[in-house]
Amino acid sequence: MKTRLLDALGALGIATVLPVQATYAATPEIISSLISQDQYVAGVENSLIHFSVALSGRDPASTASTKLVITSYKPMHTRQEVRDASSGKLPSTVDTVIIDVSNLRDAATGRVDVAIPIEIGVRTKDALQMSATGVYPVSIGLQEDKSVTSQIVTFVERLAQDVTSPLPSENLQIALVGTLNSPVSLQPDGTTLVSDETRSIVTETALTLEALPNTPISLSVRPELVDALNKSSDEDIALLTRLQASTSLQLLPSTYVDVQPDELFAQQRTDIFTTQLRLGEDVLTTGFPGKAVNRDAWVQTSTLLSGGALLLRDLGLRTAVLLANSQKTTANGVSVFVEPTRLVQLTLSNSDRMTAALADFNLSEALTRGSNEPTGGAYLVAQQILAELKIARSEIVDRDETMNGRGVILATDSGELPSQALMTALVSTVASQPDMGFVALGELLGSMTVSVMDGLPVSIELGALADFSPTNNSMLNDFASRVNGFSTMLPDGDERPAQWRQVVNVLPASNLTPIQTKAYIDAVDAQLAAIGGSIVTPTTTAFTLGGRDSSIRLSLRNDNETDLLVRVHLTSSKLTLPKDDQVVTLPAGTTTLVEIPVTAKSNGRFPVTLQLFTPLGDIAVGSPAKFSARVNALAGLGQLFTGIALLLLLSWWIHHLRREHQRRQSENDDSADRHPSGERSA
């Protein structure tokens, strides 16, 4: 009956301490944590298993006797049995030992150290029977008088007969993988704000890396966070320095901010992803001198579709590492069909392929749960993970398969690095095994091979993004063009262009809301407008041109505190203007005279428009200014017309005089013919 009660109390899980109300009013004592234990026991009669637990909550007035009830259960053969035992679904009982700890408890700390002998083939009161080899679930319950107040479940391996330490078996390589992410730290006003929550996560990560200097930990670190730490307070700079000094940190590629490859592929904006990836690598290379970024692997925390996978592959990221949250929605639950110790092929559009590796889905759940437990609970989870790793290898070997080309990737569901307590407990726990070890992710992926079924590689077909809500790409593109244009107006060494481009770099972040995005753009646009507004165009509303070829003189005043470079552009339907606009430098605080040569097409008054642009591109600076130009006389053309008129007049007079002369001559001839003398002579 007592054992049945212990079994039932285990139902709340491995890391859960279950208080049970005693029959008396005093607060019952409980097992607050498992401090340490042996991972295995020698296959020799009377070998000892050592456990250390911490007790707490005992009422000083209580006179109840306290006993530890230690029970072994039938050895396990499958990973599912390990998980069942961890959740309280224990197999049949093998043996129980009860120890009075009244005189073993440390009064100051509540710590109790016990050593339990095992027995083989016999059953006695003071020893725990473990006749068969294998991994045993072991429950440790606390009993006050006749009431059981709490219980925990752990695992112990009994070695083969007469074996005193684990024998080398098939080697199992393990990679610890995580992400170090954060919301965008750059603020719309250009300042940097690292939140307390982000600082806490970075601090925990630094502590974990420092606690495990010889254990490779592969992290996808957000480059924008690296920039933020470097530009923030002295405290944050010190945090970055601790990360930089880590000997265990292995860097994985990451985009500068969080962008989704599938959405960018669907929007035909793969250039954004490419730019983000390149910028991210540059920041990581600069921020972590001497550390290389593994370009082969990409950690995916969300759904992966064919477009995004194709984009990753085309950029040289050969293997996508799907964490548990990604597996839940990729290919309708990819982990259901895949052996996590090997790679799989992902079938993309047009029969393209890339490889994928899966973080162990069930161990991800354990890591996530264990990270939320206090130290004692984290240590218990480490025992569960070790038990599953042992059984997983045994299952493979029992199928007459080899561990060659296999490995295990450990990560939490979301990718956030497990707690320091869990990581430390896990590393120390696995260290007891001569044939298990931690390696960098790149090394593990280099040794893993693709799963084969019926002689063919296991292939998973990825879906496509059927529908999406596109961001306002034109708005972001126009903003980037404005930033690039106005940046060319400023002299070398001005810090503002770099600040503006930082805003351009963070705007694609998928975790920014439209309101936040607009706040960033509005803040920079206000600065750009102030620059444009500092240039004063002429107040004169009319220009007089003295002839066909003349010039327009413009006075441009720069009220800015720095020199500005602008392109001067005039338009008029009645003027012939130079083919190329003038690019002029406007010194700060002065007025500059700009002379534009023009050729008038006709007399009269007509409109002229002045628009200033950035030196490169067609980004308008300020509003257009409208003037009128007046041409009084076109000298060269007037002289031509006058000359022609005089020639015509002269020609008319000459023609008229000739005709008059001919008429008079004709009249004279007629008069002579009619003279009387003429007639008599005839």
Image: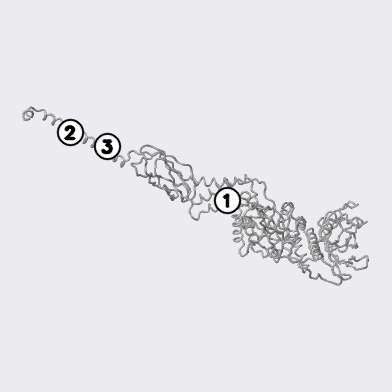
Quarter of the image containing the N terminus?
bottom right
Separation of residues labelled 1 and 3 (CA atoms): 67 Å
Q: Is residue 112 above or below residue 270?
A: below
Lower sequence index among marks 2 and 1 = 1
Q: As shown in the figure, which amino acid type bears the numbered disc 3? A: Ala
Residue nearest the viewer, comparing 523 with 550: 550
**What amino acid does circle 1 point to?**
Val
Coloring applied to the structure: one colour
Q: Nearer the viewer, mark 3 or mark 2?
A: 2
Contact check, label 2 and label 1, Cβ < 8 Å: no
Numbered circle sitting on residue 645: 3
- Quadrant of residue 5 in the image? bottom right
Amino acid tagged 2: Gln
Give the mark toward the camera: 2 or 1. 2
Mark identifier at residue 504: 1
Residue 662 seen by the camera: yes
Q: Position of residue 166 (x, y in %)?
A: 81, 69
Task: Say whether residue 375 is left or right of residue 649.
Answer: right
Badge 2, how many Cα within 10 Å: few under 14, some, many 20+? few
Residue 653, quarter of the rendered image: top left
Residue for badge 2: 662
